[in-house]
Amino acid sequence: MNETVTKYPANFIRNIIEQDVAEGKNSGQVVTRFPPEPNGYLHIGHAKAICLNFGMAQDFGGFTYLRFDDTNPLKENAEYIEAIKRDVAWLGFKWHEVRNASDYFEQLHQFALQFIDEGKAYVDSLSAEEIRTYRGTLTEPGKNSPHRNRSVEENLDLFRRMRAGEFADGEHVLRLKIDMASPNINMRDPVIYRILHAEHHQTSDAWCIYPMYDYAHCLSDSLEGITHSLCDIGFEDHRPLYDWILDEVAINAHPQQIEFSRLNLQYTVLSKRKLKLLVEEALVDGWDDPRLPTIAGLRRRGYTPGAIRDFCRRIGVTKSKNNVELAFLENCLREDLEGTAHRVMGVIDPIKVVITNYAQGRVEDLKVANHPKDETLGTRSVPFTRELYIDRADFREEANRKYKRLVAGGEVRLRNAYVIRADEVIKDSRGEIEEIQCTYDPDTLGKNPEGRKVRGVVHWVSATQCHGAEIRLYEPLFTVDFPDASDQDYHDLINPNSLTIKQGFVEQSLESAIVGQQLQFEREGYFCLDSKLSSPDKLVFNRIVSLRDTWAKIESRQ
């Protein structure tokens, strides 16, 4: 990871690790892991976990494994593995090694045999529904399976035959023998192996029995020498099982599991199941749709790794509910882009301006700074011609004094150019404005007119020296604060105005724009080329974020 990345601020996990290091626990080492299941694309919630796991290890001179929890071949594939690697690397992190839970399948199998041999595991032939019934409820204890007291020999034989593929899916499972009366349901003889006749993307058809997550995860942590197993608060009730398995096996190391609150981001869904449905139902343009909170979607939208890392640090690390406003993420992005994004001009909703006292065919190349506060970013040439485009919202035939743009009979400054006056409005047969005829003051390039007050400044592009562009404006995908928590069908919560497509014009210099380069369209917001739709023949720009929180203003008027 880039050495300039700021360290994580004080939090309860940092305090625990600091104390462990100070006391020489784990020989002073800090080893973490990020263990995603490759059954979908990562999202902003995963970014929080990535930044925390990699950031904590880095801060204490340790390292982090990228481990794929590939224990369910029915839902996982290699596409997701490559996408996850790409996302973690793009965020700026380097893993120590890539590991897979499947790397340990043989060892996990041997541990299971050990549990059976010691009378701590048994093969259960109840159906899945029967197992749920026997498990009990939060207020009522479970009851023992009729197969719980099978002999060690019978269990070993059945488990061997499960491994050999003699039984159908669901016919048997292997369960730990713990306590069916435990107040923690996770300790009521949890299933640790099930039969799945499915080809695995790493092990092919070598296995037809697969370990459950709770069993594979803690043992993988231990085999890798993980010191601090950081996971979201949903696994807090699973920690007793995590510790029980490691205490019974007594191998390399006993990592400390520490839970933190998961992220809930306003106007987004972070449920992988719902995200997958949005993609499969074609309600969005794939996993990298710029409206999605996936890392791939944020990258395509134009977000920067630095802004996401900064956001993840600033939201804090606690055990309490972590509901975060979308505006906070957007402000982190604006802060990151403000100092680096080149300023350019683009007109999203164009209306033509003809400067009647400017010579036809004349082209004046104006030298314009790429950033008003950073000379090192250089300059560019912006052609000024007789015919221009300005934004339709920047002209009114009549307006009060609060309107600081072009008004019929009034003057306004064109950004980096001259002062113009609107003299006449030309309309079509429907009464729609076709063009505004103006005159310019040739003595106002770089200076104010003497004795006259100009209303304001508007952006523009030459109508004859520009590029047409499709401009995509995004709003939140959902209309309620936290749709994951809503009881309504998520289809009913989708914002029908989450994407607006405009046909506009951008200045000539953007013919050399590259994918991944963030730009500020002056007075409009931050934009970048769409990595999937844009081409040299068709420029497609995504609005990354507006210059201010316009969504909050719209919402307040509803």
Image: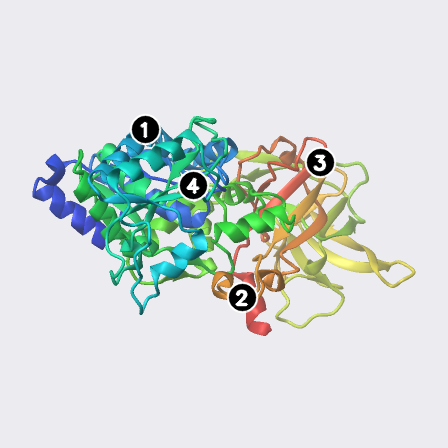
Residue bearing the label numbered 4: 305
Which residue is label 3 attached to? Answer: 538
Q: How far, Cα to Cα, is label 3 from label 4?
A: 27 Å
Compared to residue 534, the image places residue 285 above or below, namely below
Secondary structure found at label 4: helix
Task: Say which of 108 and 160 sits in front.
Answer: 160
Q: Which residue is mark 1?
A: 106
Q: Are marks 1 and 3 in contact (CB under 8 Å)?
A: no
Residue 88 visible in image: yes
Q: Which comes before the other along the chain, label 2 or label 1?
A: 1
The span from disc 4 to disc 2 (Cα, nearest Å) is 27 Å
Front residue of this view, candidates 499 and 29: 29
Q: Residue at x 30, y 55 (%)?
A: 186
Under circle 3, the secondary element is loop
User: x%, y% of residue 487?
Assistant: 52, 68
In whole angstroms, how far apart are the C-alphas of marks 2 and 1?
A: 47 Å
